[in-house]
Amino acid sequence: MYGFLIAVGVLLLLSIIWMVYRIQTLVSVVKGSDKKIASSSNKVNAILFVVFLVAVGALMFWYSIKEFDNYQLPIASEHGVVTDQLFWITMAVTGVVFLITHVLLFIFPYKYQYKENRKATFYPDNNKLEIIWTVVPGVVLAGLVISGWMAWSDITAPAPENAHVVEIMGYQFAWDIRYPGKDNILGDYDYRLTTAQNGMGVDFSDKNAIDDFASPVVVIPKGEPVLFKIRARDVLHSVFAPHMRLKMDAVPGMPTRFWFVPTKTTAEMREELGNPDFNYEIACTEICGRGHNSMRRVIEVVEPAEYQKWVSEQKTFIQANPALADGIEVEVKEVADIQQ
Amino acid sequence: MATAAVATHDTGAHDHHEHHDNFVTKYIFSTDHKMIAKQYLVSGMFWALIGGFLSILFRLQLGFPDMSLEFLRPLLGGWIDEAGKLDPTFYLALVTMHGTIMVFFVLTAGLSGTFSNFLIPLQIGARDMASGFMNMLSFWFFFISGVIMFISLFIKTGPAGGGWVVYPPLSALEQAIPGSGLGMTLWLIAMTFFIASSLMGGINYITTVINLRTKGMSFSRLPLTIWAFFLTAVIGLLSFPVLFAAALLLVFDRSFGTSFYLSDIYIGGEALPNTGGSPVLYQHLFWFLGHPEVYIVLLPALGITSEVIATNSRKPIFGYKAMIISMLGITILSFIVWAHHMFVSGMNPFLGSIFMFLTLIIAVPSAVKVFNYLTTLWRGNLIFTPAMLFSIGLVSFFISGGLTGIFLGNSAIDIQLHDTYFVVAHFHLVMGSASFFGMIAGIYHWFPKMFGRMMDARLGYVHFWLTFVGVYMVFFPMHYIGIAGFPRRYYSWTNFEFSNMYTDLNMFVSVAAIFTFGAQFIFLFNFFYSMYRGRKASSNPWRSTTLEWTTPVEPGHGNWPGEIPTVYRWPYDYSKPGAEEDFIPQTVPLSATPESNLPHEQEQVKMELEIMKEEESEVLVANESKH
């Protein structure tokens, strides 16, 4: 019944619009306005541009200011401060250009709308102007690029020697985390060794792998460099830690990395935001299939001392599952036994 | 005068063929560039509707995640699960097909295909394309491509679902996502036909522009539309083959066990034998087309805008030469910026630095174009035809979307913004909406030449304002969502604390999208109604200077019934001081307008007179020898 009523309503509305359309067409024919070069609509359109400029401009400013704290994510890494600063500098520069060009773009239509007795100015070129507005944007952009390039070089420089290594492996649809253990060296891996028990394909015949351990949460120390070694097992994924301003693709067959220095512990951030449930998160930002939107891992940033304690408490892969040590060389096995 | 009549007869012999056209050769397997253009236009509009509709489907999911989509079951069948929700895999397929359709079928074929075909011969003064047959073939390859892509929407495992960029390994492995099965195969076949179609079209456009310009139509007298179409075709010719190579290697990886893109993969409980390949290789190959593709889509729209803004400002386009140089710059630079899509793909960061520098260079010619448009409006005598409104809208989108490119081209800032909604907002404004507005502007402007009737202007105004406001309401809020870090291609954001908000803003975007999509039906009505019932057009309704307006209202096969007109001046003599009218068509000799000639043109008048005298004697001699 409702469907029928809605259909009748829509039909009525359409027929009214149709009538209005026909009538205005006929009226314009009678008035002869369709023969004119510019009808009265010209003025309406010119005014609408100004209305649009003012209304949408106001809306933009109002919303940008009102929502600032919501869309501006808190920063929790050293380089994040730099990249955010670059972001806002660029925002200021482009914002000015955006405003000036749009004011001109929408004021000109109003100011120079068609008048029968006026003739447009014949002004085909001016090389001086062209040079000015080639060089000025060029110089401004050069400034932005150079500051961006310096930041980029720092961020992508090799990680410091003492960086804490964490391996993150993406697969459909989760992340596995591996720590190198006491030696701070990750053991070898081979995707062909992957089994249900050994999801990361760790090669336990490599001595360095003996003290490696897994963790459901990425625990990292505050104020010390952390190196994420990133890889993928099946398709492309991308590690994205929004608060750390960190993003790097996980590529099968090609390990990638990203290092950074976290600046605030989870506890500190909780206090700062007044949100006791706050967590740093990792998400996936490279389309990877059905569960692309559910690849969540929590990052827990703790004080360095707490981190050391946590590391020493973790059980290695082999301790957690002795079956993994089956079939590996005796010598290596001994090392594993000593550790236990 | 007698000589002119004879000349008319010579070329006019060509015209007699058109009367023998039957339905099939006139409307289906036509070799007339105008009909092929209309075929492209109608197919482009069909695809725009499909592509737009797909986006409405996934916007429903994003804006109203709790809504029951049960009412879509008759259409989507099993893709709506028992709870009335959209299937997440199908969501990804929708996103993928929306991108593919809009970029390739609407904005490449629909825009370039329509206007390059329609305008190149008409504006350079040619009877038709260099090869009418190849032109026809180009359309029909596109048509086959479309049929295959359309079929892929309905197969059981769904269409391709790995994003429009179809990165392997996701697109190579059927185990990874159902869409990478038959759907992906059809996608690759369809794209192969599409590439063949673009190449045939492009070769034709280039050849025609170089070889078939009428007397006097030097490159420095070409309208900017033609420059844009010409350079677009050059870009397409150089970059599409690379996409073909990328697709071919992907076919090999998918079907013949090679390892170009695959390496070290464990999926579905089994380790695949492939080693040594690199998924990043595919990304390099893909973006070697993918980035120039942005300009393939955008340049024709900018060309159309230049023409429309100049005509309706009653002013010459400001900086004609600067516009050409900018377009040349964009053409060349477009080939060396591709890796800015890959800053965080794991490629060498040093490469990232290089591409950051190159990328920000390309912003300069784009900025120059914007300033030139603004100066063209300055002290003009503006007439707001619907085409003019859409052109001004295009400039606005080009600025808004272009400026956000400066953020994304900066690799340090891109770390955070890459693959978030900021990127979505950026390219939908600068490439999607701007090009779309260029296309619509072109339709409003050249409709009288295509169909001999006028579109209704008032409906055009309504269409413009609803769409212009609508597009901003859809894409502007995405900047905020993007800065907040919302990733692209997410079925829902509720799994994460950082993105577990802005449900209101997403709902707003979805409503705006539905509203904007709805507004396009005003245009569709206007288009089809005006085609049959619109006011009859005069031969030059916008009082424009270019050659297409010297043809009859409805040009027949061969475009000009008599001799092809000769060109004596550049295409932008609007409001020339001293001239009586505010426009002087390109066909008016400088010697006929002594009152408005500029000092440097006086020189040309002498040359012009000499040439005309020579020609006359040549024609006389030719006629003598015939008798």
Image: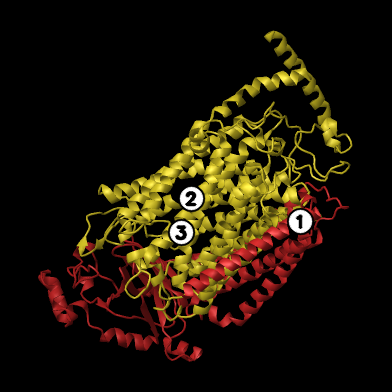
Chain colours: A red, B yellow
> Is residue B424 visible from the viewing direction of this image?
yes
**Of A4 and B550, which appears nearest the observer?**
A4
Report, in whole angstroms, how far the alpha carbon at label 2 lies from the one at label 1: 38 Å
Residue B501 to residue A259: above or below: below
- Residue at x 26%, y 54% (from the top left corner): B275
Q: Are marks 2 and 1 in contact (CB under 8 Å)?
A: no
Question: Mark 2: which amino acid?
Answer: Phe
Locate the C terminus of chain B and report the quarter of the image it occupies: top right
Query: Is the residue marked by circle 2 packed among few (<14), some (14-19), or many (20+) residues within 10 Å?
Result: many
- Which residue corresponds to mark 1? A28
> How many numbered marks, from 0 up?
3
Residue placed at 50% from the left, 57% from the top?
B49
Q: Chain of mark 1?
A: A
Instruction: State which chain disc 2 sits on.
Output: B
Instruction: State whether discs 2 and 1 lie on one chain.
Output: no
Q: Locate residue A67: give its quadrant.
A: bottom right
Quickly name the residue at label 2.
B105
Which residue is the site of mark 3? B98
> On the picture, is B370 further left or further right than A336?
right
In percent of width and height, residue A16 lies at 64, 66
Chain letter behind tag 3: B
On screen, residue B196 versus residue A320, left or right, reads right
Residue B477: which quarter of the image? bottom right
Image position, residue B622 (x, y; %): 70, 13
**Is B66 located above or below residue B137 in the figure?**
below
Q: Quadrant of the N terminus of chain B?
A: top right
